[in-house]
Image (cartoon, rainbow, N blue to C red):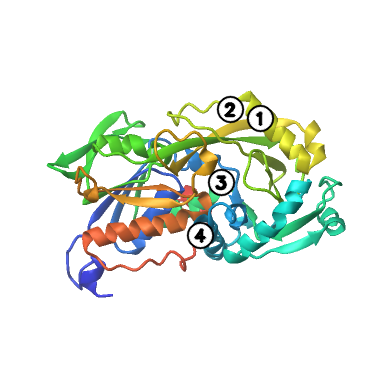
Amino acid sequence: MTAEASGLGGAGSHVVPPHVLIVGGGGTGGALAHDLVLRGLRVTLVERGEVTSGTTGRHHGLLHSGARYATTDRAAAIECIAENKILRRICPGSFEENDGLFVAVTDEDVEFERQFLESCWQCAVPTKRIEREQALRMEPRLNPDLRFAVQVPDATMDAMRVPLRFFATARRNGADVRPFTEVVALTRAGRTVTGATVRDHAAGRDYEIGADIVVNAAGPWAARVAALAGVAVPLVLSPGVLVALRDRYCNMVLSRLHPPGDGDIVLPQRRGTVLGTSSWIVDDPDDLEPPTEHIETIMREGAALVPAIAGAEIRAAWAAARPLIGEAGTVDGRGLGRGFRCFDHATDAASTEGFVTVAGGKATTMRATAEAAADVVCSKLGRVLPCRTAEVPLLPHTAWYSM
């Protein structure tokens, strides 16, 4: 790469690289900040709360193998298995590499096996059939009436610690990360977005940040940020309820062998267990009170996999809003894909330049989502800057607190 292409200039040069403002401090925003600073760009990231305090910090912590989506969303499954391998490589020590079991309990589950195995094979997701007796030796608390199970390379991760590794590495490399800083307006020159007016909630003041490009990575709040620029994003908010139990009821990630549904995941997290999840549609990502009937369904379905869950003590229940790509009027979030998209709003009807939205995706695919967004940013800037995030190891999450 030449000095000119990197945007850093040659020896003795004082060329200032382009400045990118990222709105949103979730996993995608953190991974994008990391990606862009590795490509030699200046980066400022703002988040209205603490980093990872939105959807990113509220998911169950499943590092997907892609098996869950193999029969319903092939593209998402392929993305998940690829990123599963990459994250294990660049984030060593961040995962409980416990694998997962998709468990057949009913006749319907048994009938689903052939479709499941074929779909996993097509998506390059490794599978291994486990007979009943062996499954019970691996997980003694499983429903004793199970027929068989299928082993896949799922894993457990911490919902906040893995993204913090992206934030820590980005900041170490020069990114300016500003939590408790909320975008209240976007500044414009004609049809070009030139930055943002932000509110520093800690200092109690408003100020402006100029930028060559603003990237909207606000997750379920992305439509609100886009509206500040006068553009629309086809986003559907589909929250899901998660339930944390006091004790650890399994050592592997357990799922029902059927199409994705409510309450069909049992996930070990340290000394506890997380059950999930459900799905409904909302308009306000800040109004996510877990419905009682969803909690009851999740407990019932969890007990179908692990009967001891029926008498478990609930430690907490909460909801996280999935930002899914889809049109208004959608009534069932289960039917929407789990992939991500980048929107260059210069190609919209409003022809708004200098503004990009990245939305959708999963925690497992945060790095890939960021790479796609960074490619769009670099293309708009006329820069040929390759992505390096699949090879560069990340700092430990504790580095976030020591800088």
Q: Determine the secondary structure under disc 2.
A: loop
Q: Amino acid at mark 4?
A: Glu
Residue identifier under label 4: 79
Tag 2 and tag 3, C-beta contact below 8 Å: no
Tag 2 and tag 1, C-beta contact below 8 Å: yes
Q: Determine the secondary structure under disc 1.
A: helix
Q: Amino acid at mark 3?
A: Ala
Name the mark nearer the viewer: 3 or 1. Answer: 1
Earlier residue among tags 4 and 2: 4
Residue at 49 percent of width and 65 percent of height: 393
**In the drawing, what numbered circle is on residue 290?**
2
Q: Amino acid at mark 2?
A: Pro
Residue 1 higher or lower than 317, as above or below: below
Name the mark nearer the viewer: 4 or 2. Answer: 4
Residue identifier under label 1: 295
**CA–CA distance in space, label 1 to label 4:** 30 Å
**CA–CA distance in space, label 4 to label 2:** 29 Å
Tag 4 and tag 3, C-beta contact below 8 Å: no
Residue furthest out toward the left: 190
